[in-house]
Image (cartoon, rainbow, N blue to C red):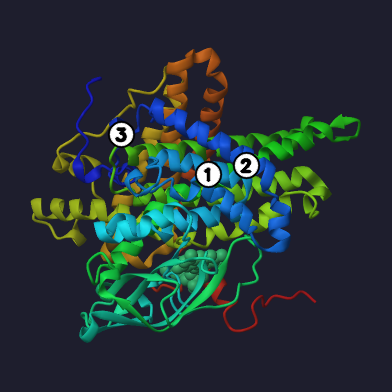
Amino acid sequence: MSAKPRPVPESLASPVKALFAGEVLEEALFPFPEPAPDEKETVTAFVGTFREFARDHIDSARIDREKAIPPEVVRGLADLGIFGIAVPEEYGGYSFSSSAYCRVMEEIGRTDASLGILVGGHQSIGLKALLLYGTPEQKSRWLPQLAAGEKIAAFALTEPEAGSDAASIRTTAQYEPADDSFVLEGSKHWISNGGIAGFFTVFAKDVALDANDEHRRITAFAVTRELPGLEVGPEEKKLGLRGSSTVPIHLKGVRVPSANVIGPRGSGFKIAVEVLNTGRTSLGAGCLGGSKAMIREAALHATQRRQFGTRIADFEMIRGKFARMVVNTYALESLVYMTSGLVDRGLSDYALEGAACKVFGTESVWNVINDALQVAGGNGFMEEYPYERALRDSRVNMIFEGTNEILRVLVALSGLREIGSDLEEVARALKTPLSNLGILSDYVGRKLRGYVARERIESVAPELAAEADLVTRYVRSFAAAAGTFLSRFGKNVLEREYQQERLASVAVDLYASLAVLSRATSSVRRNGPEKAAEEIRIARAFVQTAKYRIVGELKEMEKNRDRERAAARDGERSVIAESAYGGAGYRFDYW
Ligand SMILES: Cc1cc2nc3c(=O)[nH]c(=O)nc-3n(C[C@H](O)[C@H](O)[C@H](O)COP(=O)(O)OP(=O)(O)OC[C@H]3O[C@@H](n4cnc5c(N)ncnc54)[C@H](O)[C@@H]3O)c2cc1C
């Protein structure tokens, strides 16, 4: 056992990608990130001011009923500086770190979900391309107004025919050399903040570029509202997030100067993906705030409501729900602040960690709200209580900013790609074609990678050593399952979504377990095991429940009925699904 920290292999700096190779990047994951003391002070004060403002001016029931955030609230938020927290100080913003930004988004999520869209649609995605890829001139031109909330930003990628398959957008950009501009033609839909935005990041196909590569034709444009030909359609009628603006926008020969192109021409797809990848951690933070609000509400109810002469809080089935809500919310908090902390330490490739925050967070908050609503009984169903609104508001989280299905594909395939290059290396070294390699032995893989698998997590608190051993064991099983899957199916893994889903779910659970262990360990180190007893208990509970999910998924990776024969539609579930596709839907009416 060596206590000496090993260098983190550069290609595996992403802790989630590393899991696919059986590695726990202990140096990255331990100790749990701590906010810088001076920033903590600033952000705590900022959050306090926001809370006071929210208490006095934000009425979520009214926002939902009137389907709009009152203009005076938007102005008040602008005065607080909330529209510039992620914008550098030189452009009038607060330059908050990723972690601090998440802390504010958490507080907003705790307050009102529509507000989360207003602020997140503006900063997490609306102005992000400008921040990441804008020239100094572009930034000086727009960022000060955006940071001050004088202009609200929107991100316009989705079209009626192009949702998850964003590369298939049809909006075109035709370069006009005569006046060095582009003419945009097309329609976008479901654009958050679109009804009030003054600045749109619009993605369009640059028709002059390589027609054989759809991805490399997309270019990003800064489009301001006053440009002739930009038409904003009516507000959508939505299940939830009713206070947020969601509209179609039509680009009818909008002439955009080439000075408004964001990033290099043809790099729009990459930019869109990067913007979305960076925004997902903070979406998880919003879900975290929503979860905390629900737990508090339900706990107040459960401790006051009596049935059968007993507080309902004392019934085991109710306690079970609270335990689940608290444990999963602790895990989400650990994921969000682990990921944002890594970003603040310089991790640049965090697409999978962000996806994990989004997938875990959006599913966790949905389950928390469902549990909380159940605890509230009939009250939970009534509009005068916050549960039904929270349920409606939270549903879309699993759909936008990359659906959870697409994000599971992203996690699985990016992780596999990471080990795929190694597999090829192994095959080359052994002078064996990939298809003949069969199951890759862990050992050979690691030997060729030049480092040895970690048997134990040395930085974990002794109180959590058993759980840490369990996690490292499952990391190895997971990597073996991923390697087996890849070596057996090669590039055909692309078609095997049932397996991708399992891999991604396990990867998320493993990353969450590690984040939880790291956080509880920091609490033990800071406060001693007695004071940290509650967190130790929560961490153990999370790892133990994640274990059941992980074991189930890994078993099914090995033995399943995905495909009884080779064809894609031959598996049990696929055949059952097919029965619904003929037009009748469910075909097994009893009467
Ligand atoms: C309230 C709201 C606000 C939005 N705000 C914005 C915004 O500000 N800017 C913007 O550009 N867009 C926005 N969107 C659009 C959003 O990003 C898309 O809805 C999302 O990308 C999914 O696209 P889609 O709705 O067309 O669904 P589809 O892509 O048609 O997907 C339908 C279903 O099929 C599944 N599916 C698709 N492909 C696969 C696959 N390969 N494997 C497995 N399953 C798959 C999906 O996961 C989903 O369950 C918003 C949407 C909503 C509802």
Q: Position of residue 555 (x, y in %)?
A: 45, 48
Label 2: few (<14), some (14–19) or many (≥20) C-alpha neighbours in 10 Å: some
**Tag 1 and tag 2, C-beta contact below 8 Å:** yes
Kindly identify the amino acid type of the residue bearing the numbered disc 3: Ala
- Given residues 43 and 169, the one toward you in this image is 43
Please, what secondary structure does the residue beneath circle 2 have?
Answer: helix
Question: Left or right: 88 with respect to 543?
Answer: left
Up-down: is 194 above or below 394?
A: below
Q: Position of residue 551 (x, y in %)?
A: 47, 43
Real-space CA distance between mark 3 and mark 1, rounded to the nearest whole angstrom: 35 Å
Label 3: few (<14), some (14–19) or many (≥20) C-alpha neighbours in 10 Å: some
What mark, if any, has residue 80 been given in the picture? 1
Name which of mark 1 and mark 2 comes first in the sequence. 2
What mark, if any, has residue 28 been given in the picture? 3
Real-space CA distance between mark 1 and mark 2, rounded to the nearest whole angstrom: 9 Å
**Tag 3 and tag 2, C-beta contact below 8 Å:** no
Please, what secondary structure does the residue beneath circle 3 have?
Answer: helix
